[in-house]
Image (tube, rainbow, N blue to C red):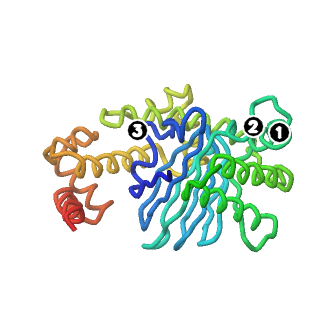
Amino acid sequence: MISRKNDPSIYVDAQGQEVTAHGTSNFPLDCYEIQLGSGFVEWHWHDDWEIILVRNGMVYVCTASGKWTVSAGQAMFFGPECVHEITGGSPDSMFHSAVFHPRFLASQGSLIWQKYVQPLQKVGCVPLFPEIPWQEECILLFKECLLAFDNTPSFYEIQTREALTKLASLLSTRLDFQQYALSVNEVRNNQRIHTMLQFIHAHYGEEIHVSDIAACAMLSRSECLRCFHNTIHTTPNQYLKDYRLQAAAQMLVSTNKKLGDIGAACGMPDAAYFTKLFREAMGCTPGEYRKGQQAKEID
C-alpha cells in the first residue's frame, strides 16, 4: 500500500502546492519514502498536515520561522499552509513522510476536532526529538502508523488513524502554542508568498520582473522584497532563476527537446547565458547533465 517517490522533484506539483489528493477522498492519508541524497524538495505548502521522520543521514528544513537540522531518528510536524523546503545534508539522506488531511482524524465540529485538531491548525512546524519523553512517544506513534500502512495488515485503516490521533492529542496537549503558533505576520506573509510563487511557477517561461511578481499579490516592490526575504530567505529574482534552472533540468531528462529550445521555454532564450547559468548551478553544461542522467538510467 505504501507509495514511494524517490525523485524529490515530483514531490510537489507545478504550482508549488501539493494539491494532488493524498490517499483517497474516504481515506485521506498517504505515506512516502524519499531518497533525498544531496537533493532537495523545493519550497511548497499544502492544506494537509505532514510529518517527516529522518531515517538516514540528515536533512535541513527551512521555513519562514527559521532553519532546522533534522538528524536520523528525529522528526518534524508541519501544520497546514506552512511553507517549507527540505534539503539533503548527506549523500545517504532519506526520510519517511506521511501527508494527511486533519479530517482523517475527526470530523469538523466534533469534540475531538475542537479539543485536539483545531489547536494544531494554527501551528507552523514543530521539531520532535527522541531525547524528550513525550516527543519520543510521538515518534514511536508515527513509526506505528508507517508500519501499519506499509505492511497493510487487517484493520490497517484503524491502526494508522489510531496512531496519528494519539500523536495529535499529544501535540495539542503538550505544545507551547505561544512558541509554535504562526504569528499574524507569518500567516499574512505565507498567504502572500503562496500567491507570488504560484505566479512565478505559471509564468517562469516569460519575461517577468519584480514589479510583475509584486503586482500579482497587490504589493509594492519593496514589500514584495521584504516578503521574500522574511519568508523564504531569498530574493524574487534569485528564486525565479533557481526555478527556471530546476525546470530546465527536469526537461533535459524528461524530453528530447533541443538544448536551446529548453532554455527558451524556461525563460532563458540566450543559449550562451543559459549554459553559463546552468554550469554555475549544476557544475556541468546542460548537454553533460542530460548525458549523465541518461547514463544513470541505463545503470
**Residue drawn 38% across and 50% down?**
242
Of label 3 and label 2, which has the lower sequence position? 3
Label 1 packing within 10 angstroms: few (<14), some (14-19), many (20+): some
Residue at the left extreme, as displayed: 258
Tell whether 222 sits left or right of 163. left
Query: What kind of element bears circle 1?
Result: helix
User: Which label is found at residue 112?
Assistant: 1
Label 2 packing within 10 angstroms: few (<14), some (14-19), many (20+): some
- Amino acid type indicated by mark 1: Ile
**Residue drawn 75% across and 48% down?**
165
Tell whether 273 sits left or right of 247. left
Of label 1 and label 2, which has the lower sequence position? 2
- Amino acid type indicated by mark 2: Ala
Residue holding disc 2: 106
- x, y percentage for residue 142? 67, 59
Marks 1/2: CA distance? 6 Å
